[in-house]
Amino acid sequence: MALESVLGQEALDQRAEGEELVEAAVLPLRDVVVFPRMVTPILVGRDKSLRAVEAAVQREEPLVTLTQREERIEDPTPEDLYTVGTLVSVARVLRMPDGTTSVLVQGQQRAQVVEFLQQEPYLRAWVRLIFERTDRPPATEALMRAVLSQFERVVQLDRAVPEDAYVFAMNIDEPGWLADLIASTLNLKTAERQELLEIFEPSARLLRLSILLARLLDVLELESKIQAQVQQEVDRTQREFYLREQMKAIQHELGEADVYTQEIQELRERIEAKNLPEEVRARAEKELNRLAQMPPLSPEVSIIRTYIDWILELPWTEETEDNLDIAHAAEVLERHHYGLKKAKERILEFLAVRKLAGERSRSPILCFVGPPGTGKTSLGKAIAEALGRRFVRVSLGGIHDEAEIRGHRRTYIGALPGRILQGMARAGTINPVFMLDEIDKIGVDFRGDPAAALLEVLDPEQNHAFSDHYLEIPYNLSKVLFITTANILDTVPPALRDRLEVIEFPGYTEGEKVQIARRFLIPRQMEENGLAGIPLKITDGALRRIIREYTSEAGVRNLEREIAAICRKTARLVAEGKPYRRVITPASLERYLG
């Protein structure tokens, strides 16, 4: 073959100018860039690549490595390869068990393809060898020192770069060699490595490498800062854990325990000692285990601790035994209240049913309706005394928020159970007499309808599993004797009124008021005003005049206030040592009441 047909006219012109052209086998590489003077292991598996290596070894042909532009191409053509590569010598060829061949090559010098000669059975090309300058002018010397300084910092920050590489770099005098060594050591992209390989001028190559090193240092320093912060936090946590374990060991030897651990242990003992249903016990133990795993200063500690305390404070199985002596109950009710025949009969009927049916009987939901001062609230206390139960009173007048009944969810700051469960905690038993006062004065606004929340509380079919938003555990209210009070029923929603057994409290007659004053009001006011043992009598005529002319009400509150006024004025005369009337008659009322 004529030389002109192999090289082409451009190659002949370059050869004529004294540049060295070499005919060499081409070894295409995927994702690998070989630099001059660097020893690089290469895995070869493609047939064309193996033939190129065999030609270089057996026929002693020069071998040039060229990197593919796209690594996924299986059979690259000359257009798929970069034109600048490295002339290499093959140091060792090893057959591997997986069928590939490991070739250890050492770069000699840069080479640029002038023209490809063949593609089969392997690639061959004319290449121009690149001879670079080795002198070190002052500018190049400064660049070498700057790059070395940057490379030292990279070695300190990047554990993937061996420290021996910096020692080797310190002993290199040629600028091009130094740039190639550092480029082959760093974790750069293939395109960046190829870019450095294609820069023939050593000083320009050092300048480009300095830019890449500066960018890499920014990433490494940021990564180092993040790792330092993480490590500092880990070290602090480990230190706290170590000190806490040491403290536990010391306190164990001293027979003591730290406050937090002691509280956890006390809570565990309280849970074990309290008779809780299985579902409630499992929930309490789960929350306690969460609490034990948290650091004492965690903001969630107080939330979980308060939740466990509420579980332990609520009565789950504790109850008082009902006094089912009907005669005793009748005597207690009669002693505390005069009249109210219908209300007393209903309570005695409840006791009779309870005595005969036992636990099968359901507690009624009573509603006392009547004017103010007719004894609705005080009768509830008397019922609790007659039954031998605890008494709890909750005033519902003026509440607007549904959470007052059902509680707030634990996600809210300062969340608490609703008033129903708070009252049960105060009672301490699951069967108290629970009075919901002023049920007709519940308000409605954007925060919800508390009356609607009461539907579940006051329904015997549902209140065995009452759901409070804070507790999130069904609570049994079926054993509670609920008593509600109202002045009028008009403002009570129909759905709620349907669940109530209404007992009317009519206004007292004049005769009943005289008896109530004689039996209850006068003795109480004399006791409260310090007149116990002092001879003082208010005649029936005086009482009737007070009722007719000084009060105008269905109940007896104003009547009691007027009696209190008489007692106070008498108490002042007694305290001053002045004479006072021992008998209050109708004629003397103007002196006391005006």
Image: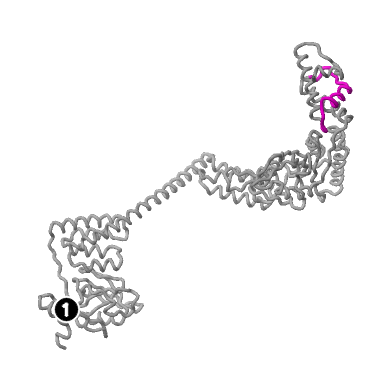
**Residue 62: image x %, image y %?**
19, 78
Quadrant in which the N terminus appears: bottom left
144 left or right of 557? left
User: Outermost residue toward the left?
Assistant: 17
The crowd level at tag 1 (other Cα within 10 Å; few <14, some 14-19, many 20+) is some
- Residue 37 appears in which quarter of the rendering? bottom left
Q: Is residue 540 magenta?
A: yes
Q: Is residue 65 magenta?
A: no
Which residue is nearer to you in this view: 46 or 41? 46
Is any atom of residue 311 visible in this view?
A: no
Q: Residue at x 21, y 55 (%)?
A: 146
Which residue is nearer to you in this view: 477 or 346? 346
Q: Residue at x 73, y 41 (%)?
A: 441
258 left or right of 397? left
- Residue 425 appears in which quarter of the rendering? top right
User: Outermost residue toward the top?
Assistant: 578
Q: Secondary structure at mark 1?
A: strand
166 left or right of 433? left
Above or below 426: residue 71: below
Which residue is nearer to you in this view: 125 or 314? 125
**Residue 361: image x %, image y %?**
82, 49
- Residue 91 appears in which quarter of the rendering? bottom left
Magenta region: 531-555
Q: Which residue is mark 1?
A: 22
> Hey, what amino acid is under mark 1?
Val
Which residue is nearer to you in this view: 241 or 316? 316
**Residue 359: image x %, image y %?**
81, 49
Is any atom of residue 444 visible in this view?
A: yes
**Residue 438: image x %, image y %?**
74, 39
Above or below 50: residue 344: above
Q: Residue at x 20, y 74 (%)?
A: 112
69 left or right of 368? left
